[in-house]
Amino acid sequence: MSGGRTSNALAELEVWFLTGSQTLYGDVILRQVAEDSRQLAATLDDSSSIPVRIVSRPVLTEPGEIRRQILAANSSDTCVGVIAWMHTFSPAKMWIGGLSVLQKPLLHLHTQFNRNLPWQQIDMEYMNLHQSAHGDREFGHLLTRLQIARKTVAGHVSDPVVAERIGTWSRAACGWHESQSLCVARFGDNMRDVAVTEGDKVEAQIRFGFSVRGYGVGDLAEAVREVTQPQVDDLVSEYEHSYDLVPELQASGERRASLEEAARIEAGLRSFLDDRGCKAFTDTFEDLHGLPQLPGIAAQRLMADGFGFGAEGDWKSAALVRILKVMATGLPGGTSLMEDYTYDLAPDKPRVLGAHMLEICPSIADGRPSCEIHPLAIGGRDDPVRLVFNAAAGPAVVLGLVDLGSRFRLIANEVDVVSPPQELPKLPVARAVWEPRPDFTTALEAWLVAGGPHHTAFTAAVGVEAIADLSAIAGVELVSIDGRTRPREVERELHWNRAYYGLPQGL
């Protein structure tokens, strides 16, 4: 496997490299086009910035073969998207039939085979062969006329920035690929009377592909009861190896039975999800029938293994966390469920304290987590076991997905995670402290005006460009709050978006 991707799960997925030309140039030129195309695809495939395989396909010169190639891409289980490049001039009307059936994400690569012009040797033969500047404008015009969503990247493939941008888009394409088959298990229902965690699950499946399946908590409790003692012992041993157990949870501790019960819940929950092919799930403290404690460490560890999770029945957050987990494969940093819980309104440097009752993923931890047990005070069950830690400092994105009734909206806020200014000896949950961009007041007001949710997906691995690529692939509005955001501009953008996304097919 090239590019040092042997441990990368996304390396089993592919992006097809489609090159356009035409028969007008003759066999000799077309053979050269094919060889050049293979070399460019190989250059991209060898880039460590691109997590998927870049697969060169035959040069396309007539409408029938273009359509067949795109239909093949649509039906491929491993193809997550296509890159299109016009080596020569390729009359765009040839592409109408194929592009009209395209169902995979598209990247239009505007490059050329040679980086530098051989000024002293340029003749008309060279000009006829190397005219991507000509062919890609023809192709781009048709894409715009057909209103086909795509990412456009210009520059030579030897430029690391070009490879990085293609790699970023390919991660979004992998997230979209995951979303098409993602199943979210919803144990119980929504937290009673809460608005933002509700939504249209049918419309979500139409728009994003993922399905939400409801299961009784009693069915999960039965799976938990079927867990054997050796399974529990193995998990407890893993806890002891991976975390710092507080004294009461250690082998001779008075709360050891609670740790074993937490392990039993994790094993049963994992088995339940695996048996049904679900890669994301929700629960709620208001419906724990048959479970002795709310899953805490179980939800945290499942997220650390790549599962999506949403609290209180929030299936949108669960799906979003899973999709971002896939997009982040192989990248430093982590991804977790998050909630803006409370604020430090110090005049000089206000901050957000993000947390949840229990379920923050240890993939974002700064150091080795502590395994603890504390009262929950709500839910009416035994004290749950959980991992406690601070999130690592650095840039991150807080991302929310909301159902506005007529459409979905993604809201992303770039933030800077910082170390807590003081110790938090009495806070018994994992947490992240951050300073939102561009500043506290602007970011919070923009989030509220955009209707952002309180449950979010927090990621220190995936940047806003990849999220923007995903939103473009999905055809979903994205409101980005970053260092350039100004309050009145956000309000104008929301007004414009209301008009644009209110049209049946956009503009």
Image: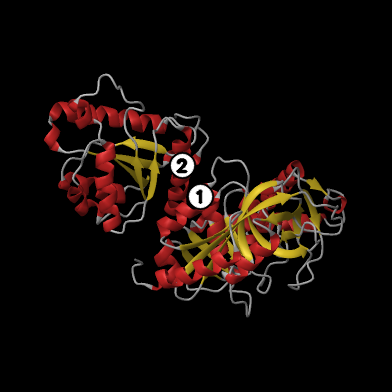
Using the image as rendered, state which of residue 444 and residue 322 is in the foreground: 444
Q: Which residue is rendered at x = 76% and y = 59% of the image?
A: 350
Res 165 label: 2
Spot occupied by residue 53 in the image (x, y as percentages of width and height) = 40, 37
Distance (Cα) linking label 2 and label 1:
8 Å
Quadrant location of the C terminus in the rendered image? bottom left
Q: Which residue is rendered at x = 20% and y = 24% of the image?
A: 123
Q: Which residue is rendered at x = 73% and y = 60% of the image?
A: 352
Q: Amino acid at mark 2?
A: Arg
- Of the two numbered discs 2 and 1 on the same chain, state the one appearing first in sequence: 2
Where does label 1 land, which residue?
465
Q: Amino acid at mark 1?
A: Glu
Using the image as rendered, state which of residue 502 and residue 225 is in the foreground: 502
Please state if 353 lies on the left or on the right of 175 as rendered.
right
* Mark 1 closeness class: few <14, some 14–19, many ≥20 residues within 10 Å: few
Labels 2 & 1 near each other (Cβ < 8 A): yes
Quadrant location of the N terminus in the rendered image? top left
Please state if 116 lies on the left or on the right of 198 as rendered.
left
Using the image as rendered, state which of residue 235 and residue 77 is in the foreground: 77
Q: Secondary structure at mark 2?
A: helix
